[in-house]
Amino acid sequence: MVDIEKAKEEIIETARGIFAKFGFRKTSMDEIAKAVRKAKSSLYYYFQSKEEVFQAVIEREANVLREKISKALAQVHDPQEKLRVYIITRMKALKQLANFYSALSDEYLENFKFIEKFRERYDEEESNAIGEILREGIEKKIFRIKDIEMTTLAILIALKGFETWIFKGNVRWSESDLDNLLDILFYGIVRK
């Protein structure tokens, strides 16, 4: 049983690099098999399809993202700083998790049922995480929010827009860019 898990791990890690380099559409089971030095037919012993391999890859990357965010949030206690750390950690991690980001954003993939479910689950997780930080901020009298759901949605929309800006051409961005975005989210643009 240990050998089966070890072989699956090797396939997932190898496929992760291939999918990241060529994308889901251009990657074939032949390429994955060649990279892990196995016959293509033997891959089907571990995974039923390329889609199933990709699903394992994006689940792995989702776990990496969760761990990074969880570890970063454990270091801070102020809700405002938690929101900042959440967003910065998330953006930095997404740059390293090409398959995860592709699963969230590639229009070609939206026709696959497992991608649709993955996106829904991730959106819900992210909404819950941000909502929890906002609730904590309200309890500690740091945030003044009329509607947590709408505020969460506004933050998520801003993040998705920022993602697009970062990943669709702006290869150079900094934490100060994120801080400026957060200043707008926290304080708005109106003088008080």
Image (tube, rainbow, N blue to C red):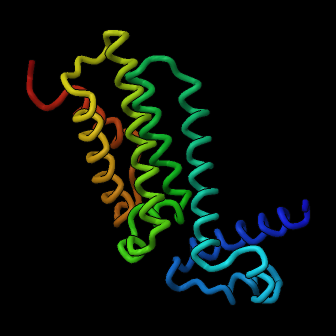
State the quadrant of the C terminus. top left
Residue 192 higher or lower than 177, as above or below: above
Residue 33 higher or lower than 46, as above or below: below
State the quadrant of the N terminus. bottom right
Q: 138 and 184: which one is in front? A: 138
Q: Position of residue 147 (x, y in %)?
A: 21, 27
Who's the residue at 41% across and 27% down the image? Answer: 132
Q: Position of residue 136 (x, y in %)?
A: 40, 18
Residue 36 higher or lower than 182, as above or below: below
Who's the residue at 52% across and 77% down the image? Answer: 23
Q: 47 and 102: which one is in front? A: 47
Q: Position of residue 59 (x, y in %)?
A: 60, 57
Who's the residue at 38% across and 64% down the image? Answer: 105
Q: Residue furthest left?
A: 191
Q: 77 and 152: which one is in front? A: 152
Rendered image quadrant of residue 145: top left
Q: 167 and 12: which one is in front? A: 12
Q: In this image, 156 relative to 3: left or right?
A: left
Who's the residue at 62% across and 64% down the image? Answer: 57
Rendered image quadrant of residue 127: top left
Q: How many marks?
A: 0
Q: In this image, 44 relative to 19: left or right?
A: right
Q: Position of residue 35 (x, y in %)?
A: 75, 82
Q: In this image, 5 relative to 184: left or right?
A: right
Q: In this image, 79 relative to 143: left or right?
A: right
